[in-house]
Structures are given as C-alpha cells and as structure tokens.
Amino acid sequence: MADSSPAGSAVTAAAVPRLALRGITRRYPGVLANDHVDLDVLPGEIHAVLGENGAGKSTLMKVIYGIVKPDAGTMRWEGAPVRIGSPARARKLGIGMVFQHFSLFETLTVADNIRLALDAASAPGLPQRIRDVSARYGLTLDPARHVHTMSVGERQRVEIVRCLLQSPRLLIMDEPTSVLTPQAVLRLFDTLRTLAREGCSILYISHKLDEIRALCQRATVLRAGRVTGECDPRQETSASLARMMIGGELPHPVHREAHAGAPALTVDSLDVRADDPFGTTLRSISLEVHAGEIVGIAGVSGNGQKELLAALSGERRVARADAIVLCGTPAGTLDAFARRRLGLAFIPEERLGRGAVPEMSLADNALLTARGAALVSHGFIRAKAVRAYAAQTIAAFGVRASGPDAAARSLSGGNLQKYIVGREIGHHPKVLIAAQPTWGVDVGASVQIRQALIDLRDRGVAVLVISEELDELIEICDRLAVIAQGRLSPAKPVRETSAEEIGLLMAGAVPTSDRVVA
Amino acid sequence: MKARLEVRAQPSRVAMWVAPLLAALATLLTGFIVFEAFGLDPVVAFTAFFIEPVATRYGVAELLLKASPLMLIATGLAIGYRANVWNIGAEGQLTLGALAGGAVALVLGDAGWPAALLLPAMLIAGALGGMLWAAIPAFLRTRFHANEILTSLMLVYVATLLLSWLVHGPWRDPEGYNFPQSKLFTANALLPNLIPETRLNIGFVMALAVVALAWLFVRRHIVGFEMRVSGLAPAAASYAGISARRSIWLGMLAGGACAGLAGINEAAGPIGQLLPSMSPGYGFAAIIVAFVGRLHPAGIVLASLLMSLLYLGGESAQMHLALPSAVTGLFQGTLLFFLLAADVLVNFRPRIARAAHAR
C-alpha cells in the first residue's frame, strides 16, 4: 500500500534529512514495540506519525528524545551519526518534545518547571518570556501558579510553552491539540507552520485525521511496531488514513433520534466556592438531563469542569440539597455512595487512582463502586460473584487483560478505560456522568466507548458527557452546553449549533492574549 | 557492567515474602559481627541467644506468652496501617488497657465476683480503655487535621505518667513495703493457665482468635475492603463514596482495642498486678512485627514469634553472656532497618546492565 522505498528517494536527494532513523528496534518483555522502523524528517517539514495506541509511536518518540535506548538501529542528525543517551543530550541537539503524559513537578510553579528544563543562562526574565510566548500562541499561562492546582489541559499548555521557549530545531508533539478550542487549534497550526517556515522540523503525533490532513506534508503510519505505510496526507481521505492505521474499516457509531423522557438529573442554580485559590468558583449552574438523551458540556479545561464533576458525583457535597436532584430525590447533601444508590454512575477523568485503585485487581476494582449491590451479602464480600462480574465486564467490552486478577495498573490506558466504562454501565444506572471518556484512548476503543454511551441512551438512561473534544461531543450528544469561567451556557440541540459557535462560547471565557500581556 | 533498579510492572509477590527472610538473615549476620566485636565465640553466643531460650517446654511456653501481646497489637495496628492511619501509640493504649481493666480487677475482685463474670468485664474494660486512648488522636485528626503519628506517640508518655501516679499514690498497695505497685489481683481476676507449670495462659488463644477475626474482616468484609481502598488510593475512595473519617476512626479504634486487650492480658496474666511499667515496649515492637509480617495475619503470627525470640534471647544473653539488655533493641532495630531496605525489591527489580552503549 505504500511507496516501496521507505526513505522516499526523491526527497533524500533534495536535502540532508534533519533526522534519519534506520532499523530502529526496541523490545519490551513480551512486546516488540518498534520493529526495524525507518523514518526521515526533512528540515522545515511537518511530519505526521500515525498509529493506534500501542502501535509504537510513543516508544519511537522516546528513542528520538533519548529516554529509551533502542536495541538495534542507527540515528543520524543532520547527516552525522549520533547516539542520544539522554533527554539533556537531545535538547542540546535541538530536539524538543511535548509529552502526552506530562512530565511536570506538581509541587513547583510553572516558571520553576520551565526553568528546570532550560539552561541556567536563560533564567533571568523567564516569567516575562513565558508570558510573551504564551500570549503569542494564545496559551494562557500564569508563571507563578503551582502545577498541582492545574487541570490536565492547563498542564499540557505548560509543556507546549516549555518547548517553544527552547527554540527547538525538531519539535515532537504528542497529541497536542486535544485540549484546545477549535480557534486555538487554528492558532497553534499557524504557529507550527511559522515554526516550520523558519526551518524547524515538526514530528506531529495525533489520531485526529482531519488535523493531520490540514497540517502535515508527510505521514508515516505505524501498526504493531512496524511502518505499514507512508503517504502525503493531503492526498488522502480520513477513511483511507484510518484504514492504513487500523488495517481495516473503521466502525462508526450508530446514532438514532433521541426519545427524551422525564428529567433524571436536575441542577438548579448551583453555586460552589473554589477550594483553592486557583480553582474555579461555580456560579448559578442550571442544567437538566432527561432520561434517554445525551447532554454534552464543552469547554477548555480549568473552567470549572473539575468542580462541577465533584459536586455532581458527591465527592464534594453542596450546601443546598435541592441544588442537585437525582431521579426526583434532592441529592446535594448526599455522599457519592448514597448518590450511586439513587442510580448514579460516574466515569472520572483520572483512571488510575480515582476511577480504579492501581494496586488492586480488576475484581477488587469492580467492587469499588458496587458495594451496595448483589456483590455483598450481610457485609461480607461474595468473592465468586465479584470475580464473575469482573470477568463478564472484561468479556463484554473486549478488555485486553489476563483476567479478573490482573492489577489495574498493568492495563494500558485505553483498556482500563473500557473496563471502567463497562463496570459503570454494568450497574444499570439511571444517570451516567462521563468525564473525558476517550482521552488518550485509541480509535477503535473510542468508537466502542461512544457506541456504549449511545446504546445506554437508547435504553432510557440520562447521560451527561463533559469533554474537551468537541468533535466527540458533536458526534454523540443530543444537546450541548458550554462551561466557561464557572458559568454554564443554556444547552442547545446539537443540530441547531455549529463547531464555530461552540468554539466562540468556549473562547469567550478565556482571557484574550491582550489581557495577559497587560 | 552497571547494576541498576528497574520498576516492576506489578509488585512481586515472591519478593514480598522473601524480603523479610532476607532481612532476618542480614540481622543474624549483623549479630555475628556484634558478637565478634564483643570477643564472644559466635557459635556459643548464637546458641545462648536463639537456641537455649526455647530448648525447654517452659521456654516454648514463654515464647508463646511473649508473642501473644505482640501479635494482638500488631493485628490491630495493621488494620489501621492498611488505611494509612499511623497509630504509633499502641504502648500508651496498652497502658490504658491495663489501667482500666486493672481498676475493674481491683474493685470487683475484692467484691468477690466469680471469674466467669469478672474476667469478661476486665477484658471489655481493658479494650475500652485502649479505645478511649486511641480515640483522642482520632478525634484530633478528623476534627483539626492533627497528625496522628505525633499525637498518638505523645499520649504514650501521658499514659505512662498517669499509671505511674496511680501506683505511686491512690492505688498503691498498703502492704507493699512502699513499692510503687498495686495490690496483687485476686485469683478470680487472673487468666486461667493453658499449660501447667508454665506461665502461658488463655491470652494466647485470645490473640490467635483476634488474628483470625481480623483476617476475616480485612479480606472478606466490605468495610475492611473500603479501608484498604482508603489507604491505597484516597481519591478512589472519595470517588466511591468511602468516608475517610470513618476509616480513620475504625483504624485508630481497632489498634486501641487490641492494644488495650494486650494490656489487661499482661496485668491479669504474667504480672498479676499493676506496676509503673506494664510492658517491655510491646506497643513499639508490634509496629515492627506488623511490617515484618507484611500486615498479613499469617505473617504477623510468624513475625511475633521471631520478635518474642529476640526478647527471650536478649534476656538469655544478659544472663549467660553478660551482654547489656540493649542487645534486644539492637536486634529489633536492625531487623526493621534491613526489612525496609529489602522492601525495595518488591517494586523494583535489580538488573545488571551491559555497559551503556550510548554516550
């Protein structure tokens, strides 16, 4: 399906590649993560690396960035053979990387985190430079803020700005746009194109095929550790790219007309004061989710999603009981367990440590949210029933795990998410709340999870999805609201709105770059 | 060649149980060096320390007698430790247990209550006394976020002084030649013996029963499960609606009840009265027992036997080898030290790597 000469002979003749990989192989116990991978990145080129989770993209990028040593293969940097033994060495060469999983010290401030990655010489005036760069690229950041108070999306901004400050010659971006508004994505693309024109090469990893087609000049497709194709994404359709990536047709979620019933979750002028100085105070949030519909809440992270989710799930109780009504029962003052008994299920954004206990087995993790149900009798755990429930969830959702005894932390992110989704759906909820249900999950599993949410809706469950992935919300939701600076817009039917309108609502709340500079 | 540690995908079960054995071995090795340094023949010293104390039927009974409070307290502490509730004050809770149970023994024993009523009353009073003392740090923690490690530890000294004042003052035996001690407990207030001509009493059976119950609670009961979740992942506990406050209360009270029970067992067992000090540091040694035993009931039973042997060996070493009594504490500390070091192997795997091929 691909060009037979992996390097693309016409291109090699034209210029010395900035980075050339030959035969890179890396083996982990039981997995061949990279199998003789060849890759050429030209100066000033935006090069996409496409592949499902587990295809070996991250390992390959870690090899380039000096975190992982390859078992075999060679690397050339601007024509000269190199061995990159550490990230510090990579940075010295001019390689910058924005990670998918953040590498930030939570107890330090934004400025301190960035300072750690830079030379001592560049330290003076750093806060101002951070403000300048973040303003230029529309990535609002306060250099004095502590990282532990920031949401996932805000942390990613720190990563991006940190790299841009080092004026890299090769920038590796691992799924950088998932937390940006559509307008901010366009701004970032402008930035990346400017960087590329200035001669910086960019390796762009993403599963968003439209973005790759809009941005990249070349794409290398990985599947199961091997290069399975190379193409010009501008000449391809999203469907043909997806085929190369998963080696088959991409299933599409079936979405029928909603038949909304009575309100199952009602939020009535909910006010929640922020816990910490950098949290968001929720102001007068009102929302109704009916049985048999999916309502989505869009928004850039850090605009109150964390606080709203905690208030809805019962992890944080609110003062007024009838501010949150679950299936006709005022629930604002109830704890998470009591709300679950009223028919609530919740899929949180953080899988390890919140949605699941990392050290415990999948069976024990099934018990985590099923403590009132058929799995416990007279206070004693029915071990057989628990294992059966876990095994059933594993089978029903195609979770790749050795069995109910596998520790939660031994599963990949996508597999654990499938397990958590399956576990929550298995409790037959009346109301399901899902936060970032497909964050970092591969394409196949994402489709499966979205389909599961739609099927749940068709069975008459009220579903609330809070996500930063606008495409996902538009695909599965019946009505859509936007959260910005702790306020929620009225929910509108998805068919009566557009990505642009939603994007403006999302961005309307973000301080403009002018205000940041001032 | 370069040795390094690699993170394991899953904690190693094998390493989890090998680590205490490695630690015990390293402790013995250290003991060898210490004996050498004292100019003693290591073989003679080891025999005196580890073999002679348990060479007789009486010795074995002593081993079990001293292991009883250790396993009892360690079991209670382990329930809290699994939930990240760090009760360090079991020694104080033991003292309060002895004091409360002892008060019942002194008052109702004289009143001539039958043993079948008096002993249960004493045991309940002892457990309640320990719980009361543990409730103070629990309250301070849940109400004011005061660190329970500090508060429970500080209360140990308060408890010791309280008991000391009682046996020096109001509860002093008028016929005791002015020694700071209470009257001897009457026969109906003493725990029945298990093996004739030894000091082993039914406190040992009680300890084993508590260990079994605790195992049932932690492994099979939903509240035990919830407490484990609280300890492993507080955010997951909050997500599942598990009350952190309840875990703290239960963890502290379980530790207090067991320590209090151990306290009254000592008073109504081998001691038979109230003294200014009711234990040779069982409350602290039990912390080591809990960790050497991996917070697991079977492990705790074995670890308490080992720790008990160290106590007996220390006494024997004083008598036969003229070593100072500090040798017991030395072995206890060395054991914990090596265990914590060996525990690295549970989550990390040592690897001898080829010389790094990149520069």
Image: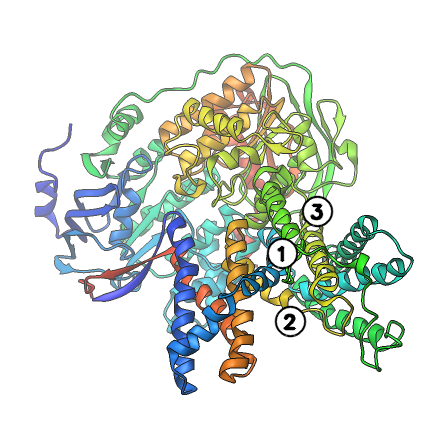
From mark 1 to mark 2, how far is it between C-alphas? 23 Å
Residue shown at 53% from the left, 26% from the top: A385
Q: Nearer the viewer, mark 2 or mark 3?
A: 2
What residue is pinned by disc 2?
A: B280
Q: Tell me where residue A106 appears, x and y as whole percent.
A: 51, 58
Q: Nearer the viewer, residue B12 or A200?
A: B12
User: Does residue A144 appear in this view?
Assistant: no
Three-letter code for the amino acid on which mark 2 is drawn: Pro
Q: Nearer the viewer, mark 3 or mark 1?
A: 1
Three-letter code for the amino acid on which mark 1 is drawn: Ile
Q: Nearer the viewer, residue B181 or A511?
A: B181
Three-letter code for the amino acid on which mark 3 is drawn: Arg
What number is the disc on residue B195? 1
Q: How many marks?
A: 3
What residue is pinned by disc 3?
A: B246
Q: Nearer the viewer, residue A100 or B77?
A: B77
